[in-house]
Amino acid sequence: MKLFLDCVPCMLRQALEASRIVTDDIEIQEKVVEETIRLLLNYKSYRNSPDLARGIHQIIKTQTGNMDPYSKIKENDLEAAISIYPYLKEFLNCKDDKIYWALKIAATGNNIDAAVYKDINLTKCIETELDKNFSICDIEIFKSKLKEASNILIVGDNNGETVFDKMLIESLSGVTVTYAVRSEPIINDVTEKDAIASGLSEVARIVSTGCNAPGLILEDCGDEFIDIFNKSDIIISKGQGNYEALSDENNNVFFLLKAKCPMISRKLNANLNEYIFKYNGIK
Amino acid sequence: MKLFLDCVPCMLRQALEASRIVTDDIEIQEKVVEETIRLLLNYKSYRNSPDLARGIHQIIKTQTGNMDPYSKIKENDLEAAISIYPYLKEFLNCKDDKIYWALKIAATGNNIDAAVYKDINLTKCIETELDKNFSICDIEIFKSKLKEASNILIVGDNNGETVFDKMLIESLSGVTVTYAVRSEPIINDVTEKDAIASGLSEVARIVSTGCNAPGLILEDCGDEFIDIFNKSDIIISKGQGNYEALSDENNNVFFLLKAKCPMISRKLNANLNEYIFKYNGIK
């Protein structure tokens, strides 16, 4: 998906916010803003929003000298997610349609996005979110494909959300699952180290996509991953970044996300903050 | 007041939004965004936020060929404001402390800022806003100065808000009032033509500041206006733009506004969306 013109000011705002996560030094924040403005002069040369976001977060890394600016946030998010895992387990146990609810749990996990929750309210918040329906839900196609499937690829998004994805994987019996992660820290996205800390290696094979953008840009991925991608019976792509990078590819992908940006929700014909489980085409 | 780093991304967002008010032509919108990015490379050379905003809105005017992009919005705002004038009149009539409530009405008028009200809800909305207290209220200083004053200068802000200001002027007996307007259309700010359409010429002398920024930058004003400014017994400055341009000047100014931006509210030690009536110093 080509980037929206609206992404341009939004990226500049994000750059400033990200610089403030790392440092209180106004001069460095100014330098980040100035370098971002310079990069945005060429915004049209970027293929999509994750491609542009990678460029901007590279500026933050370079200017602050911190190669993982979101590490503390990621740590807190994972801790918070792990703390509500027992609640999620019990929640799912009481449900008849385990597949539907496991998908809903995994979609709800997409709320863990540099989250601002206080731990004390997280369960309450997730409870409310679980209660909301998908506004697009291609679950019948999914269930039908699942009957024939022997392997599934899940393309991860944010750290913490990983714990919710683990529950989805646990509910998928009779298939092997591969969980794809970013090749290096970018924003709060899941890397191999994070996936292991989330317990995902207990239930899936973890692979790096080879791509270090906050979205799955196939052209940037390694051959090993592309092979896995092409051979997967079902692909589940988590979150907005992966949707932005993958939505124009017509291949076997189920997008599972919360539409958190007005442009993405418009593109999906959904309202802001609605949950989406959308099949993108036939392999 | 020097501009905040936060103004930089906000200005880029405003530029895009303003371009969309004028045209659906994506190429022109892109051109506005690109030119704004180019201008923002030099954001540090601008004295304050209104100074930068003027530069950006000049780009919109040039690229769209429309010298008054907000004219329709201004027209609608004025119409909406005029429609609730009878309600305001009745509201004020029932009050004992006419000066306080006239100031509160004038501050509440600061809500009419490229407003999104549907006419049908405007009275209800204004009613709710009138019910809120000032969080900073230097009214005792004002009342004391008013006893000695023979002339008052009000520096206008948005069109439509003008109708609320008219009510303030009507409640100030025994003084002559001058109402200052922008020298040409900039955003939705009041110009001479707008002030006359708002009925302000019935109660005040209307003068142009000579400044075409969306805030009163004294260095840019004409000699005639500076003379009026210096000779006024009391100056009331309406809205954020004038506050941003004038707040570092230590002169006889009462700032009357709603703090609608997080940076301004922080500067004022107020919460977002609180009402302010603040005296800035001694002439």
Image (tube, coloured by chain):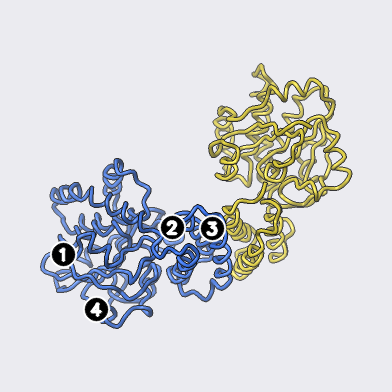
Chain colours: A yellow, B blue
Q: Return the residue found at the far left.
A: B174
Label 1 packing within 10 angstroms: few (<14), some (14-19), many (20+): some
For the residues carrying marks 2 and 4, which lies nearer the camera in this image? 4
To which residue does mark 1 refer? B203
Image x and y of residue A76, in percent: 66, 45
To which residue does mark 3 refer? B29
Residue A35 visible in this rendered orientation of the protein: yes
Dot 4 falls on a residue whose secondary structure is helix
Q: Chain of mark 4?
A: B
Q: Between disc 3 and disc 2, whose residue precedes?
A: 3
Residue drawn at (22%, 66%) of the image: B142
Whole-number angstrom distance, CA of label 1 to CA of label 4 = 17 Å
Q: In the picture, residue A19 is in which quadrant?
A: bottom right
For the residues carrying marks 3 and 2, which lies nearer the camera in this image? 3
Quadrant housing the C terminus of chain A: top right
Residue drawn at (54%, 74%) of the image: B44
